[in-house]
Image (spheres, coloured by chain):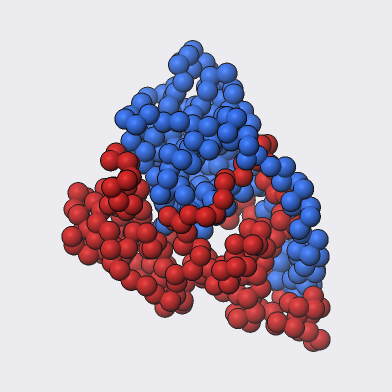
Amino acid sequence: MNSVHDMGGMHGMGPIEYERNEPVFHAPWEARTFGLVSAMNCWGKWTLDALRHQIEKIPAADYLRMLYYEKWIVAMVELAVSSGLATRAEMESGIPAPGSPKLTPPLTAAMVSGMISQGAPSTRNVPIAPRFRTGERVRARNINPIGHTRLPRYARSKVGTIRRDHGVHLFPDTNAHSLGEKPQHVYSVRFTARELWGDAASPRDAVYVDLWDDYLEPA
Amino acid sequence: MTSDLSHAHEHDHKHEHQAVPSDPALRVKALESLLVEKGLVDRAALDALIDTYEHKVGPRNGARIVARAWTDPAYRQRLLTNADAAIAELGYGGMQGEHMVVVENTPKVHNLVVCTLCSCYPWAVLGLPPVWYKSAPYRSRAVIDPRGVLREFGLELPEDVEVRVWDSTAEIRYLVLPERPAGAERLSEDEIAALVTRDAMVGVAKVTPAGKGAAA
């Protein structure tokens, strides 16, 4: 979706605010939010792509105003309600519905280090041929889906060169919407700064964007 | 790593973060108690998750990788050609670092990492990202004006250096292998690891021999 989260190339966002000796979390509620959302993800009721999309759907003005972990809370609450893990009334009142069963959390403290060290690879070991080869010139498609996509607006319709094949990964545009993983090759595509931003850009600089087969066409 | 210019934009975030979140603080407290009561989360698991990223997984991991690469040319080669395996050799990897690519700074090439669409960051080697990395000013401008962004961080790059910006749009996570500063060849791996900053491994700073970059 073409919302404000897709901000590569925008002006007007102000100076970068750098904080020296920044703590990992700025307040206890940020730490608890990180833990809560990470633990809730372990129910397997939604994908990381769905979580990202839920954050993107936060209205643009709120998205820009909210602190980072506030967006996590909003997204997790929506996903927990839509997936049936909790009701909206429960999420708003903080009180379990009368008679609701007590469940067993999927993530225990003992499982945390294993979960983190194992990770959740997005690669899929399926024999799918790449549509493009390293060195080939490609054009990013001009698509404007209303759902989730990882093709940034600034790269659409632009021509770049495939520099590396990252192998077969699941496809966020379908995975975010429970429409299947649709595994396909992801490539590192080099776009020159001038192709993206015009003749005023440096003749040397480039932006490398990781793009899926479905985002690309021969140039 | 800070110049006078970047100083101008340094803020005391404590103020900002204390002023805003009484509301989120209450909200999160209520949510945690609900989700614990329903059996949806285990409070001790939350503690363990938080402890991991506050105390165990952070930029020291990345600094160990860089230190090894600077002292062991064969390791450096493995790191640049198969980062996942080379990083696993040092015992790192996993969540938000499952598919790593290491890009090397040289006198002619400077690499900078961003996620314009959200906040993707190589947790496994750098820990959780700082606020500026997740912020709209950095995400919006890193791709269109990387040299201006670097200038705000106090890094002025000559015209003849190629800037490569890596937008983390997929699940591939990027780590910058900074240039080794002059004199570092005499240092031990431990001494080098102490010099290498998070900012240098994101590409917004260089590694300076006197530990001037120790702020981050």
Classify B136 as above or below B153.
below
Is A158 or B114 nearer to us in this picture?
A158
Residue farthest bottom in this picture:
A99
Does residue B201 sit above or below B136 in this rendering?
A: above
Q: Is residue B133 above or below residue A106?
A: above
Q: Is residue A55 left or right of residue A28?
A: left
Spot occupied by residue B137 in the image (x, y as percentages of width and height): 54, 51
**x, y percentage for residue A54?**
55, 71
Chain painted in red in the figure: A
x, y percentage for residue B127? 59, 45
- x, y percentage for residue B13? 71, 46
- Chain shown blue: that is B
Q: Residue at the location (43% across, 33% down)?
A: B177
Left or right of B137? Residue A186 is left
Q: Residue drawn at (69%, 79%), measured in percent from left and top?
A: A86
**The N terminus of chain A sits in image quarter:** bottom left
Left or right relative to B210: residue A173: left
Which quarter of the figure is the C terminus of chain A placed in? bottom left
